[in-house]
Image (cartoon, helix red, strand yellow):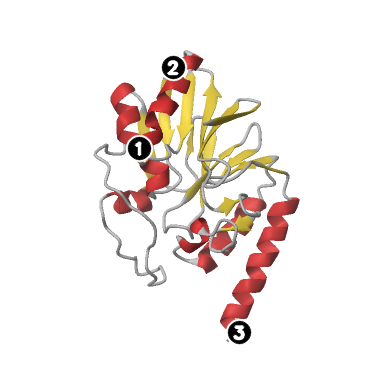
């Protein structure tokens, strides 16, 4: 496990440098907030690090329902039963095994590992809500209910797999040969591009992602967006 600190954010990275999976612990006045939980086998290390900070875990915020983001939920909540679990209303259905699409969604196959967890969300989130100093933003594309969390005070964005930086900064669905897994597991590439642009428009100072190092500023995000738009244009011109 590799630990990276930026201001009040602790990023824990597993399986670096080949297949990095990130979770972020954010310090709040009353305790800690965990964004995503990696795989079930990584829960022990996450719990040990939380214990080392000697502060209570207030909540787990999930960016989406893929297994490398929700796998540790049950084990972490067993040790911290008072921590609250949050996920988007849409991806809560994926946790229940429902892979059907809605009438207003493109009928594309929902990809990626979707393990069943036993813990039930304390709240199903909708875009625009605020909690623990974050505003919830719609980030659909990688999954139908992907969300990002924006720390409005520090202008730090927690984007889940809406972007990746390992193997090259990329929008979800833009397959990068050095690390293709997030791209291959993306449900709707067009939605991913549209929502990535809205996230960039927030002008974050730093963006934390599910796979790779944090991204400073927006320059590399804009370059990734331009690349994804070009690829989408070529696809629809065929």
Which is more foreground, mark 3 or mark 2?
A: 2
Gap between marks 1 and 3 measured at Cα: 42 Å
Mark 2: give few (<14), some (14-19) or many (20+) Cα within 10 Å.
Answer: few
Q: Earlier in the sequence, mark 2 or mark 1?
A: 1
Quadrant position of the C terminus in the picture: bottom right
Q: Residue 177: x, y in percent?
A: 59, 62
Residue at the spot of label 3: 237
Residue at the spot of label 2: 51
Viewer-nearest residue: 104 or 69: 69
SS for dot 3:
helix
Q: Earlier in the sequence, mark 3 or mark 2?
A: 2
SS for dot 2:
helix
Q: Residue 54: x, y in percent?
A: 47, 13
Relative vertical location of residue 143 with respect to residue 58 in this rendering, above or below: below
Residue at the spot of label 1: 40
92 vs 201, left or right, is left
SS for dot 1:
helix
237 vs 146, left or right, is right
Gap between marks 2 and 1 measured at Cα: 18 Å
Residue 17 appears in the figure: yes
Mark 1: give few (<14), some (14-19) or many (20+) Cα within 10 Å.
Answer: some
Relative vertical location of residue 18 with respect to residue 151 in this rendering, above or below: below
Q: Residue 140: x, y in percent?
A: 48, 57
Residue beneath the point at 35% across and 28% down: 76
Residue beneath the point at 67% across and 59% down: 224
Residue beneath the point at 54% across and 53% down: 162
Mark 3: give few (<14), some (14-19) or many (20+) Cα within 10 Å.
Answer: few
Relative vertical location of residue 215 with respect to residue 183 in this rendering, above or below: above
Viewer-nearest residue: 8 or 177: 177
Residue beneath the point at 63% across and 72% down: 231
Q: Earlier in the sequence, mark 1 or mark 3?
A: 1
């Amino acid at each position: 496990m590799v630990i990276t600190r930026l201001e009040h954010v602790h990023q824990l990275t597993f399986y670096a440098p080949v297949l990095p999976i990130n979770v972020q612990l954010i310090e709040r006045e009353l305790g800690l907030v965990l964004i995503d939980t990696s795989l079930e086998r990584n829960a022990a290390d996450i719990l040990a690090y939380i214990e080392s900070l000697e502060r209570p875990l207030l909540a787990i915020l999930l960016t989406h329902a893929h297994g490398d983001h929700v796998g540790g939920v049950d084990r972490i909540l067993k040790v911290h039963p008072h921590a609250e679990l949050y996920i988007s209303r849409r991806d809560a259905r994926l946790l229940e095994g429902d892979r059907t699409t809605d009438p207003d969604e493109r009928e594309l196959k929902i990809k990626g590992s979707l393990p069943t967890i036993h813990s039930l969300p304390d709240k199903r989130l909708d875009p625009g809500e605020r909690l623990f100093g974050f505003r919830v933003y719609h980030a659909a594309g990688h999954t139908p209910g992907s969300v990002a969390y924006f720390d409005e005070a520090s202008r730090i964005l927690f984007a889940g797999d809406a972007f990746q930086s390992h193997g090259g900064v990329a929008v979800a669905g833009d397959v990068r040969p050095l690390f293709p897994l997030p791209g291959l597991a993306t449900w709707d590439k067009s939605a991913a591009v549209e929502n990535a642009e809205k996230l960039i428009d927030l002008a974050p100072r730093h963006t934390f992602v599910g796979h790779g190092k944090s991204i400073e500023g927006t320059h590399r995000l804009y370059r990734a967006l331009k690349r994804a738009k070009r690829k989408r244009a070529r696809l629809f011109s065929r």
